[in-house]
Image: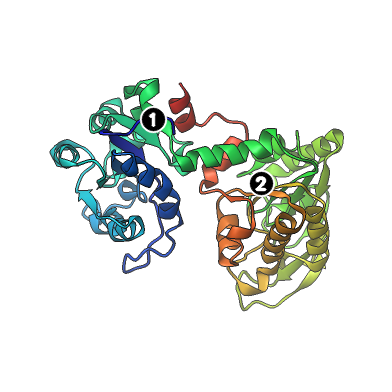
């Protein structure tokens, strides 16, 4: 951050869309912790920080009477934990625009922090409304975007608001800078061999990413339910496994492209199959292209785990997005656990650079206590995928313009 914050009010877009339990206690404060360096820097430089964030989708989940469920979606739930982590009190404004927000921002002194109410309480936020963005911009002297997880959305607080600040009055925060730097390490400065590991349920969610990765990786590892679309496309028997019938041609095209580009494409040759989608289901090992009728693949098998681990061990750069199976169920978590351990080991023992690209992969790595043994864990699922696909993220472009 090159901005001078002394005596200025900084409008900071953070991502405080954190998970809560039924008593509204925060169950994972990672996103709050990741925002701390930027907030601390601003106040330590003599500035005041005005924080704004979305939280959930309140307008999509209205009460039965058609009103917003403020108690469920208020950012007030974050204030206590943020104050505790910052070691200073955090003021809270009951709205992000209007008289309440304007008064709270005007009263803010250097070194103080103000959190505005959920930007998504206003329909104008997701619509990217300019007048709404201008109201937000009017609260401060400079703008800092530190919400990489929302950078792929052209919303008022993530993108449009930047229009109202000159080039010398807007900046990325430290988290955004880290996210972009680490993604660029994989995209543009990768040490070879470069291995990408993709999992998850659907090919359709990641077809653009798969196509893009096939242009520049050395090894492409595909696990999770999406692998069965590839086996079915090649004439295999997949039982009751999840298959996208309308994506069989796309799968075959990707296989052909990988071959043409000299990319080593690894699919899981065996699977842990079950007779029902349940933790208590009967399960056994079968070849992934010869799954019995009535059975479904829910994790990669031991042969696949060994092959994938060997590929990771040989890699100098690793990108991982998506679990290898239904890792929330203990009998089908071994594949994802094995990948997480292999990536951590390659990072720690051979100095490989490893980027965990958001989503369930992050949850898996953190659950296993390996988050600090990989090179970088991204906070942005959708944003990281789109960036890796080569798309221009609106929230990034708005700062660079």
The residue lying at 51 percent from left, 38 percent from top is: 177
Gap between marks 2 and 1 measured at Cα: 42 Å
Q: Position of residue 211 (x, y in %)?
A: 71, 36
Which SS class for mark 1?
Answer: loop
| Residue at left offset 35%, top offset 30% | 4
Relative vertical location of residue 65 with respect to residue 208 in this rendering, above or below: below
Colour mode? rainbow
- Closest to the camera, between mark 2 and mark 1, is 1
Could you tell me if residue 348 is visible in this image? yes
Q: Residues within 10 Å of mark 2 (few under 14, many from 20)?
A: many
* Residue 7, percent from left and from top: 25, 33
Instruction: Name the secondary structure under disc 2.
Output: loop
- The answer to whether residue 29 is above or below residue 43 is below
Q: Is residue 269 left or right of residue 225?
A: right
Q: Answer whether residue 116 is visible to the viewer in this image.
A: no
Q: Nearer the viewer, residue 119 or 184?
A: 184
Q: Quadrant of residue 384?
A: top right
Front-most of residues 312 and 1: 1
Q: Residue 122 falls in which quadrant of the image?
A: top left
Mark 2 vs 1, N-terminal side:
1
Which numbered disc covers residue 314? none
Name the residue rendered at 21%, 37% in the picture.
97
Q: Position of residue 265 (x, y in %)?
A: 81, 46
Query: Residue 340 location in percent, x, y?
Result: 67, 61
Task: Give residue 203's mark.
Answer: 2
Nearest the eye: 20 or 205: 20
Where does the N terminus fall, quadrant-wise?
top left
**Looking at the image, is 157 positioned above or below residue 203?**
above
Side of 13 relative to 115 (left or right): right
Q: Which residue is mark 1?
A: 3
Quarter placement of the C terminus: top left
Q: Is residue 21 left or right of residue 267?
A: left
């Amino acid at each position: 951050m090159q901005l001078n914050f002394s005596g200025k009010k900084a409008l900071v877009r953070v991502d405080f869309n954190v998970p809560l339990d039924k008593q509204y206690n925060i169950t994972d404060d990672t996103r709050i912790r990741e925002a701390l360096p930027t907030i601390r820097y601003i106040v330590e430089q003599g500035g005041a920080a005005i924080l704004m964030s979305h939280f959930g989708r309140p307008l999509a989940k209205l009460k039965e009477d058609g009103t917003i469920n403020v108690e469920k979606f208020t950012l007030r739930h974050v204030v206590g934990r943020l104050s505790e982590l910052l070691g200073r009190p955090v003021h809270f404004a009951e709205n992000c625009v209007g008289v309440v927000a304007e008064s709270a921002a005007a009263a803010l002194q250097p070194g103080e922090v103000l959190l505005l109410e959920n930007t998504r309480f206003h329909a104008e936020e997701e619509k990217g409304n300019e007048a709404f963005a201008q109201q937000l911009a009017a609260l401060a002297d400079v703008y800092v975007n530190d919400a990489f997880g929302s950078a792929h959305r052209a919303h008022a607080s993530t993108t449009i608001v930047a229009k109202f600040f000159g080039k010398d009055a807007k900046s990325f925060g430290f988290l955004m800078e880290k996210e972009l730097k680490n993604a660029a390490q994989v995209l543009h400065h990768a040490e070879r061999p470069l291995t990408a590991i993709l999992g998850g349920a659907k090919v359709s969610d990641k077809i653009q990413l798969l196509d893009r990765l096939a242009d520049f990786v050395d090894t492409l590892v595909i696990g999770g339910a999406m692998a069965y679309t590839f086996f079915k496309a090649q004439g295999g028997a997949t039982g009751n496994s999840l298959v996208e019938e309308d994506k069989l041609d796309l799968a075959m095209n990707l296989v052909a492209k990988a071959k043409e580009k000299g990319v080593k494409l690894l699919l899981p040759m065996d699977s842990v199959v079950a007779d029902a989608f349940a933790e208590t289901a009967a399960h056994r090992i079968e070849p992934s292209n010869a799954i019995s009728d009535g059975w479904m693949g829910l994790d990669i098998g031991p042969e696949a785990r060994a092959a994938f681990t060997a590929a990771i061990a040989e890699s100098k750069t690793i990108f991982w997005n998506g679990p290898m199976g239904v890792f929330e169920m203990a009998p089908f978590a071994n594949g994802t656990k094995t990948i997480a351990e292999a990536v951590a080991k390659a990072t720690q023992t051979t100095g490989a650079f490893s980027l965990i690209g958001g989503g369930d992969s992050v949850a898996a790595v953190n659950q296993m206590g390996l988050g600090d043994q990989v090179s970088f864990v991204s906070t942005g699922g959708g944003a990281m995928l789109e960036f890796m696909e080569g798309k221009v993220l609106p929230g990034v472009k708005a700062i660079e313009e």
